[in-house]
Image (spheres, rainbow, N blue to C red):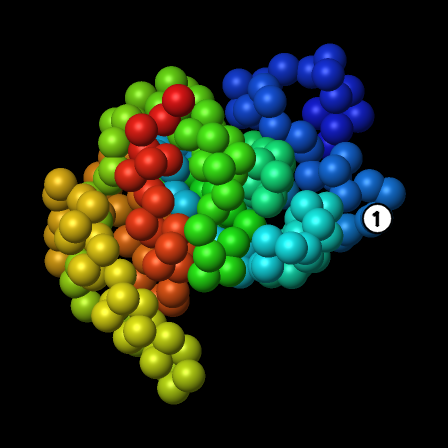
């Protein structure tokens, strides 16, 4: 990532999306201690959509700074962030695990955080996500369609407040998932090992990510460009 940032416009890598901006240039001159992960990502099943849980009124650089500073030192992150105006930011190369959702899905999925907070993605964000998904399809050969949606039991965090959020996510997401997916499963492993466009909850059902309005937009993103 550093090599790319140092040679931006004059550096190519199969693990870097050609029209993305490296996060370190986008938030410059602000400094961050975030470091991309080193663990290799070898078998990719597709692209997983997440919400940043950051209001769309916040500026793009402020959103990206907030994400990477929150991830710094915790060994978590995402591969991409799409800010409100549709700008695509890359944080981790796609040959590295980003630890975006949790569970074994981390070892099989590329992740994109979309700057939303229980809100719809903007038309620019949708277009950017469609471009990104098409690029991922060409790169890893996954299906250009929605992956298998998960409608089984959600994971129950120990913290009662978090547990309530997970239960709310199941209540709100299951009907949408059944409506938009041609294939659904109650077995988490089947959802994780399916192919195409997925989301945090379908891969690790522990919290309300990507949010109901964005979940409803997944078929639009799955069309690609
Ligand atoms: Zn998420």
Please tell me whether residue 73 is drawn above or below residue 184 in the rendered image.
below
Q: Position of residue 178 (x, y in %)?
A: 15, 53
Give left or right: position of 127 versus 141.
right
Residue 170 image point, x, y percent? 25, 67
How many other residues sit within 10 Å of disc 1, few (<14), some (14-19) or many (≥20)? few
| Residue at the image point whose x is 24% and y is 70% from the top | 171
Residue bearing mark 1: 30
Of 101 and 19, the residue lying toward us = 19
At 13% from the left edge and 58% from the top edge, which residue is drawn? 186
Residue positioned 67% across, 30% down in the render = 21
Q: Is residue 161 left or right of residue 191?
A: right
Is 147 on the left or on the right of 47, as rendered?
A: left
Direction front: furthest residue: 123
Residue depicted at 31% across the width and 21% down the height = 141
Q: Nearer the viewer, residue 178 or 183?
A: 178
Visible residue check, residue 72: no
Q: Tell me: 217 left or right of 187.
A: right
Q: Is residue 198 visible?
A: yes
Where 115 sits versus 110, above or below?
A: below
Residue 141 versus residue 127: which sits nearer the camera?
127
Q: Quadrant of residue 101?
A: bottom left
Name the quarter where the N terminus is drawn. Answer: top right
């Amino acid at each position: 990532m550093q090599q790319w940032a140092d040679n931006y416009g004059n550096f190519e890598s199969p693990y870097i999306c050609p029209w993305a901006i490296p996060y370190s240039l986008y938030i410059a001159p602000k400094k961050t201690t975030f470091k991309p992960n080193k663990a290799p990502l070898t078998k990719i099943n597709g692209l997983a959509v997440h919400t940043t849980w950051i209001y769309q009124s916040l500026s793009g650089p402020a959103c990206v700074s907030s994400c990477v500073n929150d991830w710094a030192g915790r060994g978590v992150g995402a591969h991409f962030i799409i800010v409100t105006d549709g700008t695509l930011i890359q944080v981790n190369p796609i040959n590295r695990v980003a630890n975006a959702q949790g569970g074994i899905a981390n070892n099989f999925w590329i992740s994109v955080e979309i700057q939303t907070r229980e809100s719809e993605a903007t038309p620019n964000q949708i277009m950017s996500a469609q471009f990104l998904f098409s690029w991922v399809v060409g790169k890893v050969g996954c299906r250009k369609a929605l992956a298998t949606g998960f409608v089984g039991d959600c994971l129950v965090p120990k913290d009662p407040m978090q547990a309530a959020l997970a239960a709310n996510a199941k209540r709100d997401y299951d009907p949408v998932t059944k409506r938009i997916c041609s294939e659904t499963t109650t077995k988490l492993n089947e959802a994780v090992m399916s192919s195409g466009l997925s989301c945090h909850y379908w891969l690790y059902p522990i919290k309300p990510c990507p949010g109901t309005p964005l979940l409803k937009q997944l078929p639009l993103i799955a069309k690609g460009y």
